[in-house]
Image: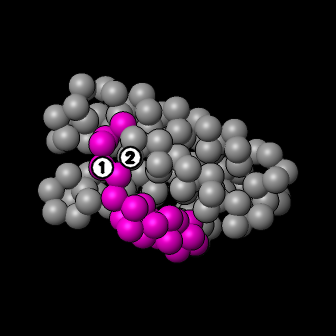
Amino acid sequence: MLLAFLQASIWPLNLGLILILTRAFVISGKANLFYAFGFGLLLSYLYQLPLGLLSLICIALVEFVYFWSKTPFSKNILTILPVIGGLILIVEFFTGAKIWPQILLEVALILPTFLIVRFWEERFFAPKEIKLRV
């Protein structure tokens, strides 16, 4: 949620959205939907847009990324760049900020964010099912 405050005030990059979408690409679950809803609601409030508009957009994007991650085409790590880059363009259309160098910087930040999220989730969280031998 700190990224939403940074995005709305001094740092106009969509790092929160990139983080949520890459997490949805790595891990499937209800928590991604809650994160997207909270992030979108807070961002709608901070941008003074209709309350809930960005929440619905973020939830729809998380669902799209979740369904995309289940396809065999998405097993290549480089397919995340055009998919999430296109989704960022959709959000930029709704927020009204269309600065192309900023969008290219956001697309360049997708892959490092993906690798950081993947490393974080694999190393610091236990799998859902741990089978113990007795």
Q: Residue at x 36, y 37 (%)?
A: 94
Mark 2 belongs to which amino acid? Glu
Residue 33 place in picture, x, y as percent: 48, 36
Residue 48 included in the magenta stretch of the image: no
Quickly name the residue at label 1.
97
Q: Is residue 108 above or below residue 43?
A: below
- Mark 2 and mark 1 lie on one chain; the one further toward the N terminus is 2
Residue 104 place in picture, x, y as percent: 46, 67
Colouring rule applied to residues: one colour
**Residue 123 placement: quadrant:** bottom right
* Magenta stretch in the rendered image: 94-116
Looking at this view, is 121 or 84 the one in front? Answer: 84
Q: Residue at x 50, y 65 (%)?
A: 107
Please tell me how crowded label 1 is: few (under 14), some (14-19), or many (20+) other residues with Cα within 10 Å.
few
Left or right relative to 78: residue 4: left
Residues at marks 2 and 1 touching, judged by CB atoms closer than 8 Å: yes
The disc placed on residue 92 is: 2
Q: Secondary structure at mark 1?
A: loop
Please tell me how crowded label 2 is: few (under 14), some (14-19), or many (20+) other residues with Cα within 10 Å.
some
Mark 1 belongs to which amino acid? Ala
